[in-house]
């Protein structure tokens, strides 16, 4: 499986700077051979280590169909092991970031079963696919900067809470919609949002009322870092942040994300033990010496690919 993922990563991320939808027939065939024939996402590989991942169902306001969940997991599993990728900018095509779960896709519903126990087990397996796809974004140690514009509803909120840095446009609005349609959000929002914003009261309010909240409220809560006037400005800001990350030691960057993820879910003492054990190995990397040498020479260090 690891060999297949590496092959998939090489095929996917040698795409020069063209989205999947406009690849040559030969490149599309190579991508298909790697098991990554993408329809719901577009990937653009940058020479500076900054990769773009775009939600690519604009006709449905990027509603997430069953194929989307499979492709999201495949793409971020490939990015995770590609040494040329240092950071990711996620955005969406069309008028909105995402309208949430695509209710028009029958495959988004769990397989039927007459027995209630078996039906429940099918549901668990079904939702696990969705959860694992979003978790793949979080588990990929290449940091993801996400740009939200327009609507970010339901599963869209699940997705952005798994990203590392969130930016949005002034016309953005957010909604944890699930309570209004008869279920509890089960793909990540209820697990991640309280830790992202650090305000239990407001998370409960937003999840229980299922009301919309706008860009300014999202910023005041700490859900997003900044609000930009347009999608173009937000993308430029995201690319600037991503480029700054990509210029740092990739060993240090993935180590920082790994330890931030660990610290979120563990005690301070456990996290201190984890990071000193981590650095006991990683500080022996060539990157530390390169950074010190460059600082002494007042130059910018150049770090090797992972």
Image (tube, grey):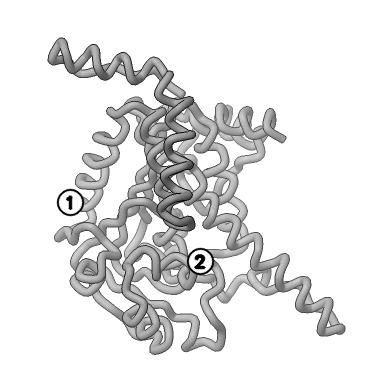
Asked whether the beta carbons under mark 2 and mark 1 sit within 8 Å of each other, the answer is no
Vertical placement of 5 versus 110: above or below? above
Residue 267, image x, y percentages? 45, 56
Residue 188 numbered mark, or none: 2
Q: Residue furthest right?
A: 115
The kind of secondary structure element at disc 2 is loop
Q: Is residue 304 left or right of residue 190?
A: left
Describe residue 86's horizontal placement relative to residue 81 as left or right: left
In the depicted structure, whether residue 303 falls above or below residue 262: above
Which quadrant: the N terminus?
Answer: top right
Q: Position of residue 286 (x, y in %)?
A: 39, 15
**Of tags 2 and 1, which is closer to the observer?**
2
Dot 2 crowding, Cα within 10 Å, few <14, some 14–19, many 20+? many
Q: Nearer the viewer, residue 18 or 291?
A: 291
Residue drawn at 41 percent across, 28 percent down:
251
Q: Tell me the crowding category of disc 1: few under 14, some 14 to 19, or many 20 or more residues within 10 angstroms, Cα based.
A: some
> What is the total number of numbered labels drawn onto the structure image?
2
Q: Is residue 174 above or below residue 256?
A: below
Residue 5: image quadrant is: top right
At numbered mark 1, what does the secondary structure look like: helix, strand or loop?
helix
Q: Quarter-wise, where is residue 186 in the image?
A: bottom right
Q: Position of residue 65 (x, y in %)?
A: 57, 64
Q: Which mark is residue 112?
A: none
Q: Which residue is mark 1?
A: 233
């Amino acid at each position: 499986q690891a060999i297949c993922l590496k092959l998939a990563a090489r095929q996917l991320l040698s795409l020069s700077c063209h989205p999947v939808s406009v690849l040559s027939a030969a490149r599309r065939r190579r991508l298909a051979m790697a098991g990554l024939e993408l329809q719901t996402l577009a990937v653009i590989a940058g020479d500076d280590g900054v990769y773009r991942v775009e939600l690519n169902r604009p006709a449905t306001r990027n509603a997430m169909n069953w194929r989307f969940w499979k492709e999201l997991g495949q793409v971020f599993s490939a990015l995770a092991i590609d040494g040329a990728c240092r950071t990711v900018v996620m955005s969406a095509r069309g008028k909105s970031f995402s309208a949430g779960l695509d209710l028009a896709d029958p495959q988004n519903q769990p397989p039927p079963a007459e027995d209630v126990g078996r039906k429940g087990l099918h549901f668990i397996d079904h939702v696990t696919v969705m959860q694992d796809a979003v978790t793949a974004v979080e588990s990929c140690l290449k940091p993801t900067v996400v740009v939200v514009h327009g609507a970010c509803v339901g599963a869209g909120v699940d997705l952005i809470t798994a990203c590392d840095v969130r930016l949005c446009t002034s016309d953005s609005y957010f909604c944890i919609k699930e309570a209004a349609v008869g279920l509890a959000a089960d793909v990540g929002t209820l697990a991640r949002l309280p830790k992202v914003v650090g305000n239990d009261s407001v998370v409960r309010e937003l999840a229980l009322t299922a009301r919309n909240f706008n860009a300014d409220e999202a910023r005041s809560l700490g859900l997003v870092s900044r609000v930009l006037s347009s999608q173009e400005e937000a993308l430029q800001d995201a690319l600037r942040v991503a480029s700054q990350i990509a210029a740092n030691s990739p060993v240090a960057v993935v180590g920082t994300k790994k330890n931030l993820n660990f610290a979120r879910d563990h005690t301070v003492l456990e996290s201190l033990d984890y990071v000193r054990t981590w650095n006991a190995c990683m500080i022996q990397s060539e990157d530390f010496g390169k950074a010190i040498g460059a600082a002494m020479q007042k130059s910018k260090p150049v770090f090797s690919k992972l």
